[in-house]
Amino acid sequence: MKESWKRIKCPYCFAEFAHDEVHFRIAEEACEDAKNKAAKKEDPAKQEEFSKFLKREEVDPKYDKVWGSLRGGIPAPNVEDSFFIPWVDPSNKSDMIVGDYIADNDGFIEKIEDKCGHFESKTRICPYCHNKLPLHYGKNPQKFISILGVSTSGKTVFLKQLLSKLQDSLQGGILSHVNGSFVDQLSLPDDDNSYLTLNQPLPDSTKTLNFKVPYFVTMTFEKKKELKTYDFVIYDVAGEILVDLVKENPNRFEFFAGYIKSSDAIIMLIDPMQLVNNPIPKYPASNMISTLYRVFGGQVPVPTAITISKSDLLLSSALIKESLNPDGVFFNPNSVIMKNIPWDPEKKYFYADEYALLSGQLRRFYTSKANPFYVNVQQQIANPSFFAVSALLDGVDQKLTFELVSRDEWKSNYIEAYMKKFGVLSKKLKNIQLDLEDQEANPADNIIDTNNIIVRRSFIFDQSDEVARKLDEILRDESILNTRADVREAVYERFDEDEIIELVAADHGGNETLSMRDLIRYISSKKEEMDDYSFDIYMQGYPRGNGDLRSLRIEEPLFWLLSEMDIIARGNVYTSNVQNDPEQSGVSGNWWKNLLKNLGPFGGKKK
């Protein structure tokens, strides 16, 4: 047995166990097979035997270990459902499975065969918390990476773009720039199987109240002509949950903090708006650093990539430019921050000198426009480095959508009342009214399906539009807007009472205006429970692009972390490819030492 197989760390409860100490869930097919056999009402002995393979009525008692209400909260339904499927452990092996656990060709335990229907199951579960482990998880050394950021920081989009590009094995894929590297396996969380696609809405922001099932990526790297494979566990953590729980629920804070503290490295995404002083953000960047310090109970000991997300907004958003980059004094279209890394296929490692150009720009920017944040990072993180990325370089269209759904069959004479109440939908409602009148006059013609008619209209904002940002803030907080007074206060906190919003129709069907009075009324209608209809108003982001979802420097924070964890080498883009030894690579030792000295806290650990 390999030594590493004796100490596999659970990505949920962090208990350690050997590969042959895992438990198994039986296959769901075995549950169905047992149910069908039990229905035949064979002899009592057989009935008792089948009953062991039926889905349990009570949840697995180890469910609360991670998913208890004071801990991770309620998972996605398919995650929760798995805790009702019978499991196999050393105490019931002889009753439940044929023989013993079955190993692969390398001797690593990977599956069982049940005695009821002889179905194979590869659903390995942690013996301590019974959460599902990915296939072959633990066969390789594990590395834990937390990606931390508030729900507006673009964290989930960044992660999906990064994973997508890691999977790209074609020429130009980002792992092609690290010697012999490739993705062996990628496992998406059971509650998250969405991808970024043109003309499709971006995934919803990370839910702040629940723990999110991590992503699992197995990657192989070549270093010094030796291949080594790692199992990476990537946590997508909503940063505001840590800030909010510090005082509200210290026990739950400790649960979520546990995932950060167990990380080998951290990427913290900072939305540019978190650096703006006016208006004051709800979760300033400095607060995020202080909270991270509190998570560890002192200086953060692991490599931490402090990363500006949506870096393109430093040049495109009027508010962000005015506050952080006036007249392009720090960044312009020719700045290195707006250029992708000029990879050389012959030189494959983390490009320290290319990064030095970026860090120099960022240092000047932070010391001038966000010095308290910069000082916090220096004092509270032992090994930080600063980056700037854009997961969607071509930007995002924000769509404000109004949607009216009939719960019963509509008739033409119903429409008039809805047209008065929802003026923004009046043109579409008028067309439906005419169709309904034709349908009622000619019932055999099937002009329109009168059941559950959905009336929907969308309006487009640029992602840098301040109106879109304010609307998004209001609608994201709808769960705490319990009364019309709450809605009114939320609206007037961000807009003037007599302000008018210009709406540009997504379908070119004519533009509209939206008064604050109408906005309050619409949001209040969204909260109402009506028997005959439901009304919704929501914001969604849609990626732009001409056949491609371009990104900017998105791999750089990860590659730096990999170099800091001594998984990949680092070197100089302009020198010969002698890895991990700059003094032997054609670069003078003094040049390298001066580079690290000049990088200050951005240079990472000296190799």
Image: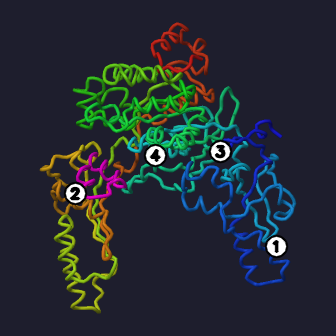
Please name the residue that numbered disc 1 is placed on: 49
Tag 1's secondary structure? helix
Considering only order in the chain, which callout, 2 or 4, is on the residue closer to the N terminus? 4
Q: Is residue 562 magenta?
A: no
Of 403 and 504, which appears nearest the observer?
Answer: 403
Residue 443 found in image quarter: bottom left
Q: Earlier in the sequence, mark 1 or mark 2?
A: 1
Q: Disc 3 marks which residue?
A: 13
Q: Nearer the viewer, mark 4 or mark 1?
A: 1
Taking the image as shown, residue 70 lies to the left or right of residue 497, namely right
Residue 370 drawn at (x, y percent):
34, 24
Question: Magenta part of the protein: which range?
Answer: 469-490
Q: CA distance from mark 3 to mark 2?
A: 44 Å
The amino acid type of the residue labelled 2 equals: Ile
Which corner quadrant holds the C terminus?
top right
Looking at the picture, which amino acid does disc 1 mark?
A: Glu
Sequence-wise, which precedes: disc 4 or disc 1? 1
Q: Residue 520 shows which numbered tag?
A: 2
Mark earlier in primary sequence (3, 2): 3
Q: How would you rate the neighbour count of disc 4 (Cα within 10 Å): few for under 14, some for 14-19, many for 20 or more? A: many
